[in-house]
Image: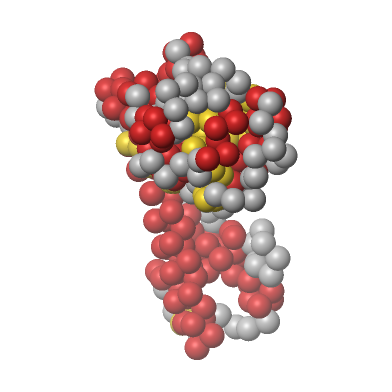
Amino acid sequence: MPKGLPPLSALRAFEAAGRLGSFTRAAEELHVTTAAISHQVRGLEDWLGVMLFRRTTRRLFLTEDGQLALAHFREGFERLARGVEVLRDRDRRRILTVSTTPSFAAKWLVPRLDRFARLNPDIDMRLAATTALARFDRDQVDLALRFGGGRYEGAKSQRLFGEFVAPMASPRVWAKLGRKPRPSDLARATILHDDSVLMTGKQPGWREWLRKAGAAAIDLDRGMHFDDGHLVLQAAVEGRGVALGRVALAAPELDAGSLVAPFRESLALSAAYWLVVPEGREERPAITAFASWIASEARAFARRLPL
């Protein structure tokens, strides 16, 4: 029990006796003896240091302290009962709450969720899009999809697919740099920076790519910075500049041609996309169904990943 609380059995015995006005009726409700109820209540009175009941030979009366205690304890048990019912109802309806980043939700997960819904019509999906790591012991989250190193305390991780970056921009931006742009031509373009990658630790970026491409002299102190991978890609689509974009996130735009990546050079990131499930929940039917589905989707996506 949490520090400062008496035994739950004693609280339950008192609540039943106070509500029913009888040790005997409380014993019948809780399926114990009248003596057990009396013993539990006496122990609670000793623990609290107050008298909860005034006893006569024929009747049982709540004292002023007992009336105050009963109101609070009854509310507490009602809240516990509601919590249990919510969990039972949740299990019956197979609600699944998934936490992931806004960029991954928008660019990869949401466009595929209709396939999951068709395969699992009895599962109600709840999507929590946030950059904060899910606290499974506190947040009402069943599993998470995360971009990072794959080590999360108290959870098991399954790698879905990796990620790498390459310069990409809209066709009209590249047209301004020439029919066949070279890495050195990026000196005449607005550079777009995806700072969200830095949240996963040290990762290669523009400086490393330019060095690999032989254009290390380009000034990287200029340009626009974004803290979300989806936003930097949207800025590139809108013609704001050239992004060192995440290829997995940009796959729809690269396939459609609204973004073009003309250079052969790319950089692999050490971070990857992971399915993260808290320990002990792996066998829940809804989680098992989602894990199987997303692993299949990830394999198919990785096989056709652009570049």
Q: Is residue 117 or residue 38 the one in the foreground?
A: 117
Q: Is residue 215 left or right of residue 143?
A: right
Task: Return the x and y of residue 72 as percentages of the image width and height.
Answer: 48, 75
Task: Return the x and y of residue 226 as percentages of the image width and height.
Answer: 52, 49
156 vs 34: above or below: above
Q: Is residue 300 or residue 8 the one in the foreground?
A: 300
Task: Return the x and y of residue 110 as percentages of the image width and height.
Answer: 35, 34
To which quarter of the image does residue 20 belong? Answer: bottom left
Q: Is residue 289 visible?
A: no
Q: Is residue 222 visible?
A: yes
Q: In which quarter of the image is the N terminus?
A: bottom right
Q: How is the image coloured?
A: secondary structure
Q: Which residue is at a point 29% across and 27% down the rendered structure image? A: 114
Q: Which residue is at a point 70% across and 65% down the rendered structure image? A: 3
Q: Which residue lies furthest to the front in this view?
A: 178
Q: Is residue 130 or residue 1 the one in the foreground?
A: 130
Task: Return the x and y of residue 160 as percentages of the image width and height.
Answer: 55, 22
Q: Which residue is at a point 51% across and 78% down the rendered structure image? A: 69
264 vs 183: above or below: above
Q: Which residue is at a point 37% across and 21% down the rendered structure image? A: 255
